[in-house]
Image (cartoon, rainbow, N blue to C red):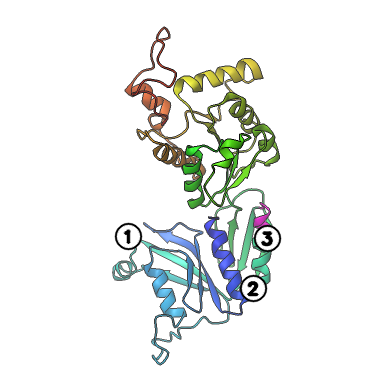
Amino acid sequence: MENLDLTVLRHLLQWRRDGRRALLATVIRTWGSSPRPVGSIMALCETGAVVGSVSGGCIEDDLVWRYSRAATPAEAPAADGITHAIPEGPPERVTYGVTADEAHRFGLPCGGTLELLLEFNPDADALAALISALGTGQLMRRDTEIATGRVSQQPIERPMPLSDDGVWLRNSFGPEYRMLLIGAGQLAEYLATMALFCGFAVTVCDPREEYRRSWSVPGVSLLPGMPDDVVREFLVDRRTCVIALTHDPKLDDLALLEAIGSEAFYVGAIGSRRNNAARRARLIEHFGQTEESLASLRGPVGIYIGSKTPPEIAVSIMSEVLAVKNGVPLPRDMQVGTAKNTLQPAAPAGDQPPVCGSPATRHLS
């Protein structure tokens, strides 16, 4: 499953290429609580088909009623100037939730108001150029002249918040976030499935044929190379996360060494507190790393939710990845290692627990 914005843009392009009228709605301003953040987009076809969202559903229903005949009999007269058709012409601003009655009718939270910009019949060639650039991994800014609907697009280096100065609406669109998993085991299958539903493009690297042969999740790129080579060739950027899941230092360590020096927004590895400490010591002693150079390496990965099974551990990891992606600071007591140290201190150095840990300590997150 791809980035939601890309899905919206692809459907919008297809409708326009098919000769259908369509509109692009963008959330440009919110007051109080709002179901969707500024910059969210949706596309509406004259048939009533909708992709994307700008609210919890009620505003989408209103837009369908206003700009299509999908829910209106053909013989029904127009009401209050509403033609039930997508017009030609420049963009329009629409505000929902100004009054308490409107907020209630459109399902907005108490005090919630949002403003949309509706662009009618966007140019297919411009949409195709934008989608093509995003497909190559380029971050793009789309500028719409509000008085005319004229659009210009250019690459940018870093994401920018949506801006509306009354003359131009500027919105940035990024390529898909990418997740590179080292290891094709059962945990990787659950984590890859969740990442796909969250809009990540997922690649799994595992040189072990027996693991690749049993892989069952569709929509994932499966690579057979050595992990360090794959990380180098992956062109890791600020929209990439790299997670090592094999428990095999020969595979995990070399991949992590390549990833921690990259721009990846998240780099981490599965494992117990003991294994995580051993990994750090190994990387420092044998590979010239320092505590400072390993500061971005996360492990044990995930937030502490008492995970016991591979699906639960995948939820834990995916939650932390999304928090970091969205810029949400996580309290230290939510980190797996910190939480477990608080709940159950590690065994004294002289103790020798079983290889996989006792039943109370073997869970990974």
Q: Which residue is mark 1?
A: 109
- Under mark 3, the amino acid is Ser
Tell me how far mark 2 sits from mark 3, CA to CA.
Answer: 14 Å
- Under mark 2, the amino acid is Asp
Where residue 73 appears, as percent x and y from the top left, is 39, 87
- Mark 2 surroundings: few (<14), some (14-19) or many (≥20) residues within 10 A: some
Where residue 64 appears, as percent x and y from the top left, is 43, 76
- Mark 1 surroundings: few (<14), some (14-19) or many (≥20) residues within 10 A: some
Q: Earlier in the sequence, mark 2 or mark 1?
A: 1
Do labels 2 and 3 touch, CB within 8 Å? no
Q: Earlier in the sequence, mark 2 or mark 3?
A: 2
Q: Within the magenta stretch, is there residue 171?
A: no
The numbered dot on residue 301 is: none
Residue 111 appears in view: yes
The quarter of the picture where the C terminus appears is top left
The numbered dot on residue 132 is: 3
Q: Which residue is mark 2?
A: 123
In the rendered image, the vertical position of residue 118 relative to residue 341, given as above or below: below
Residue that appears at 51% across and 43% down: 325
Residue 241 appears in view: no
Residue that appears at 57% across and 82% down: 88
Instruction: Give the side of residue 268 with respect to residue 224, left or right.
Output: left
Front one among 242 and 166: 242
SS of the residue under disc 3: helix
Image-quadrant location for residue 226:
top right
Residue range highlighted in magenta: 133-138
